[in-house]
């Protein structure tokens, strides 16, 4: 399992240092949550912050857009240093045009589904995608409880990709901790996002190591 700590739970006044800290603690990717106050009821970071923290690490930037019109902002986030851009299927932009734009910028594209969205919604786009992100909380805030009932979506995606011989990574996001990561691993997730679980851990290195090699236990 690869681990993508979410900067949403870091100390915003020391973002550069926090990126270095999480890199040194063994993170695989850096997850950046972009919220516009419309698609979700919260406002977080924009491209200016992404480019400000970009020089602090060589790890891939996994930029999760929770915004109404992702297509309008692909240029800005790609130029700011995103390596992967994921956007919501529930957003207003045309999914194919948005995926195409991301790929034209030379970076990787992913689609995200909210808890109430059926997994089949992303099936028509799978052959164009690097990643699918299955939300395990309602997007908008860190520190919420993991929704174990999203795990069948992860397994369904895994099976669909296998059937079609597609190599699409599956990421889970929301409420991932040492207690819940086993379920995500058992369901077939490749990458887990963790905000509180990493940044509020007593020992960050230990927390990341545990998430990377979780007990394969669907009931933990
Ligand atoms: C929620 C964000 C998540 C969030 C995860 O809308 O997409 O990335 O930061 O935070 P935790 O791990 O605290 O649930
Ligand atoms: Zn996220």
Image (cartoon, rainbow, N blue to C red):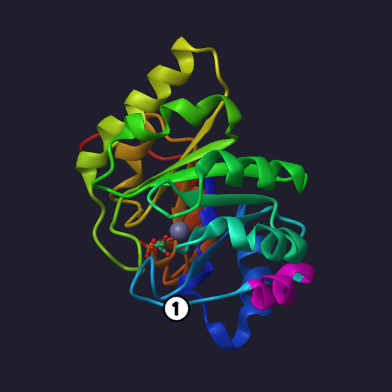
Instruction: Place residue 149 in its image quadrant.
Output: top left
Q: Nearer the viewer, residue 12 or 181?
A: 12
Q: Is residue 191 magenta?
A: no
Q: Is residue 91 above or below residue 57?
A: above
Q: Nearer the viewer, residue 163 or 148?
A: 163
Relative image position of residue 180 (x, y in whole percent)? 29, 47
Magenta segment's dominant SS is helix
Q: At 39% across and 72% down in the image, what residue appears?
A: 38
Q: Element under label 1?
A: loop
Q: Which corner quadrant of the figure contains ligand 2?
A: bottom left
Looking at the rendered structure, the number of numbered marks drawn on it comes to 1
> In this picture, is 22 found above or below 16?
above
* Residue 217 seen in the figure: no
Q: Magenta stretch: residue 51 in it? A: yes
- Nearest the camera: 118 or 196? 118
Q: Position of residue 144 (x, y in %)?
A: 27, 64
Residue 122 in view, yes or no? yes
Residue drawn at x 28%, y 50% is 179
Residue 134: give x, y in percent of width and height.
38, 43
Q: Is residue 162 left or right of residue 135?
A: right
Query: What are the residue bounds of the magenta stretch?
Result: 47-55
- Name the image quarter holding the C terminus: top left
Q: Residue furthest bottom?
A: 13
Q: What is the crowding at mark 1: few (fewer than 14 residues within 10 Å), some, or many (at least 20)?
A: some
Residue at numbered disc 1 = 43
Nearest the viewer among 151 and 48 is 48
Q: Position of residue 98 (x, y in %)?
A: 59, 47
Q: Residue at x 39, y 67 (%)?
A: 196
Q: Is residue 138 above or below residue 1?
A: below
């Amino acid at each position: 399992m690869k681990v993508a700590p979410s900067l949403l739970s870091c100390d915003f006044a020391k973002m550069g240092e926090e990126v270095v800290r999480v890199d040194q603690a063994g993170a695989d990717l850096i997850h950046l949550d972009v919220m516009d106050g419309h698609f979700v009821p919260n406002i977080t970071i924009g491209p200016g912050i992404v480019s400000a923290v970009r020089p602090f690490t060589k790890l891939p930037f996994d930029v999760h857009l929770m915004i109404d019109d992702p297509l309008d902002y692909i240029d800005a986030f790609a130029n700011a240093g995103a390596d992967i851009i994921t956007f919501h299927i529930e957003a207003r932009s045309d999914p194919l045009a948005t995926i195409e734009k991301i790929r034209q910028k030379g970076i990787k594209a992913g689609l995200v589904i909210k808890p109430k969205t059926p997994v089949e919604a992303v099936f028509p786009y799978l052959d164009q995608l690097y990643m699918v992100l299955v939300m395990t909380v309602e997007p908008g805030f860190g520190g919420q409880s993991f929704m174990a009932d999203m795990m069948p979506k992860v397994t369904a995606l895994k099976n669909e990709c296998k059937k079609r011989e597609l190599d699409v990574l599956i990421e889970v996001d929301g409420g991932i901790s040492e207690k819940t990561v086993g379920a995500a691993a058992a369901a077939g997730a490749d990458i887990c996002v963790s905000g509180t679980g990493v940044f509020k851990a007593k020992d960050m290195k230990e927390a990341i190591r545990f998430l990377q090699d979780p007990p394969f236990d669907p009931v933990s």
